[in-house]
Image (cartoon, rainbow, N blue to C red):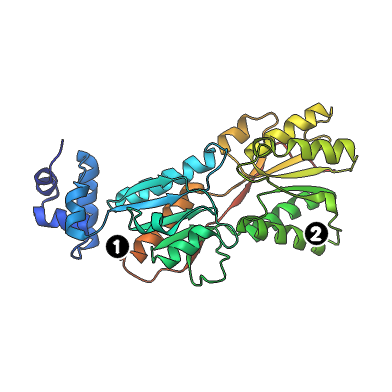
Amino acid sequence: MAKIDDVAKLANVSKGTVSNVFSQKRPTSNEVKERVMSVSRQLNYVPNHIARSLVTKRTMAIGLTIPHGSFFFSAFHTQFINGIILEASYYGYRVLLDMIPLQKVQTPFLSSYPIDGAVVMSPTKDDERINLMHSEQIPFVTVGRVMNSNVTNAYNVDNDNHTIIYRICKYLIDKGHQNLMFLNANELMTVSIDRKAGFIKAMEDHHLVVEEHMIHHKPDLSSSEYMDYGYEETINILGKQMKNVTAIIADDDRTAFCVLNAIKDLNLRVPEDVSIFVICGDLSMMVQSNPSLTSMDLQPSELGAQSVKLLMNQLGVLQGDFPGNVIIESKIIERNSCSTI
């Protein structure tokens, strides 16, 4: 196992400089920092976090809080978490993954939380996690817009969800689709609120009426219906109510596959009878599906990396002026699930 002496020798710096790079106790030039970090990765050098914590008075760990419920990590989650871990390790930080139940976080727990800061994923309106971190003065960055009345100027990283759904609707409308069905995220999530507004705006701008059957919301994470979201909605609207829906926008890949199963059970075809567009999907799974599914690339790894950078700025590890809000670009990846009518 490599030691600090090995890193110092190969990087042509003193042991004190190597220590400073990892502890951030004293400023180091970017050129020296890059050289030390490069050598450290080359030698697989891992600093002693306990010793560093004693010196810096920090835990050298950040928390990643993910809503708790009956679900497994999707490819989006995996790529997002990977982006966080890689970026955090660059600054010598570990990541504590915590499945904190929504609306059940208590102040005594947070006050002893062994982290220097946190990344909060999938915020909801008046999110209790955000309220408590704010009150306990724990630095945090959210991945998604903050809608807590008592929290202003919060750091956040996000996609432009209003614009994303607007672009998806326009893409489908330009192909001749007018009767759309939108299987949105849970109605309490801020991303869901932004998407719904974007959907309504797109329909209004194209002089189309938003009917009751068009917008649906994912059930609560703890509900038994969560894992099958999309199937019953499709069966009900297209099969029982006989609505002439020609295109379905699915929140994620699991929802899209439930829709595919329902369409098959209704003896319909994709895209000949119904087109499908996936907002948040695993790009590799989208290709392997039959037909391959048109989707948005939301760049989950970049969402994770940028959230860590904003947090490092709050912790004083990264210097300079950083925006309070970072928007990650997204793009439509066309495949074979959307047809022109």
Q: Is residue 163 visible in this depiction of the protein?
A: no
| Picture quadrant of residue 46 | top left
Q: Nearer the viewer, residue 65 or 73?
A: 65
- Looking at the image, how many numbered discs can be counted on the residues? 2
Mark 2 highlights which residue?
203
Q: Nearer the viewer, residue 72 or 208?
A: 72
Tell me which residue sits at (20%, 60%) in the image: 56
Mark 1 / mark 2, whichever is N-terminal: 2
Task: Kindly tell me whether residue 289 is visible in this rendering.
Answer: yes
Residue sitting nearer the eye, 271 or 316? 316
Query: Residue at 24% across / 61% down in the picture?
Result: 30
Q: CA distance from mark 1 to mark 2?
A: 45 Å
> Few, some or many C-alpha atoms within 10 Å of disc 2 (few <14, some 14-19, many ≥20)?
some
Callout 2 secondary element: helix
Residue 259, picture quadrant = top right
Q: Tell me if 174 is positioned left or right of 98 in this view.
A: right
**Depicted 289 relative to depicted 148: above or below:** above
Report the quarter where the N terminus lies.
Answer: top left
User: Relative to 34, is 298 on the left or the right?
Assistant: right
**Quarter of the picture holding the C terminus:** top right
Residue that extends furthest to the right in the rendered view of this protein: 242
Q: Position of residue 153 (x, y in %)?
A: 49, 72
Say what amino acid the circle numbered 2 marks: Met
Question: For mark 1, does the 10 Å Cα neighbourhood hold few (<14), some (14 to 19), or many (20 or more) residues?
Answer: some
Q: Is residue 200 above or below residue 228?
A: below
As drawn, is 118 to the left or to the right of 92?
Answer: right
Residue to which mark 1 is pinned: 317
| Residue 202 picture location, percent across and down | 76, 60
